[in-house]
């Protein structure tokens, strides 16, 4: 489930979700994704519905994004509350099985194609 953003953005998100579900990604096969996703179609809900799970996702995603951008030298890290959130969830990141590395596994930076 995700928050709706607009007709064009929602269409692009639905298309990307469907493509990942049916064909996998560079990181996970379609079979792996289908085993953990509940549907072949993403559910989009407006922000006005104030869904608790989506609010928590927002609370976690923004600080983690900021941390990744800071690690990549794209921004200067300054938000101490966000750093506290990142510290609290750090044990939940996917890690490489052999060496426990998070970068490239639980935190992946994919720069925009320009």
Image: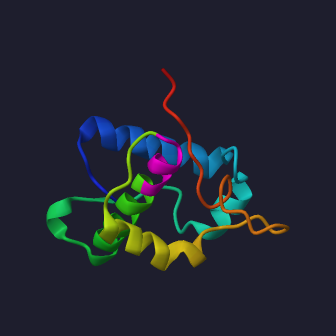
Is 49 one of the magenta-colored residues? no
Quadrant holding the N terminus:
bottom left
Q: Residue drawn at (31%, 71%), measured in percent from left and top? A: 81
Q: In this view, does 104 lie to the left or right of 84?
A: right
Instruction: Look at the picture and state if 92 lies above or below 16.
Output: below
Point out the stretch of residues depicted in magenta. Answer: 67-73
Q: Farthest residue toward the top?
A: 114
Q: Farthest residue toward the left?
A: 48
Q: Residue drawn at (81%, 67%), measured in percent from left and top? A: 99
What secondary structure predominates along the stretch shown in magenta?
helix
Residue 100: percent from the left, percent from the top?
75, 69
Number of on-image labels: 0
- The residue closer to the viewer here, 22 or 51, is 51
Using the rendered view, name the quadrant where residue 6 is placed.
top left
Instruction: Look at the picture and state if 76 lies above or below 46.
Output: above
Residue 107: percent from the left, percent from the top?
58, 56
Residue 47: percent from the left, percent from the top?
20, 61
Can residue 1 be spotted in the picture?
A: no
Instruction: Look at the picture and state if 31 lies above or below 70.
Output: below
Q: Residue drawn at (18%, 68%), measured in percent from left and top? A: 49
Q: Is residue 55 left or right of residue 93?
A: left
């Amino acid at each position: 489930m995700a928050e709706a953003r607009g007709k064009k953005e929602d269409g692009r998100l639905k298309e990307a979700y469907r493509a990942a579900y049916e064909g996998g990604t560079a990181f996970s096969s379609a079979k792996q994704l289908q085993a953990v996703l509940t549907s072949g179609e993403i559910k989009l809900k407006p922000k006005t519905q104030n869904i608790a799970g989506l609010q928590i996702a927002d609370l976690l995603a923004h600080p983690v994004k900021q941390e990744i951008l800071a690690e990549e030298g794209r921004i200067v890290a300054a938000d101490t509350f966000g750093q506290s959130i990142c510290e609290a969830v750090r044990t939940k990141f996917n890690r490489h099985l052999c060496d426990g590395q998070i970068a490239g596994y639980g935190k992946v930076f994919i720069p925009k194609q320009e």
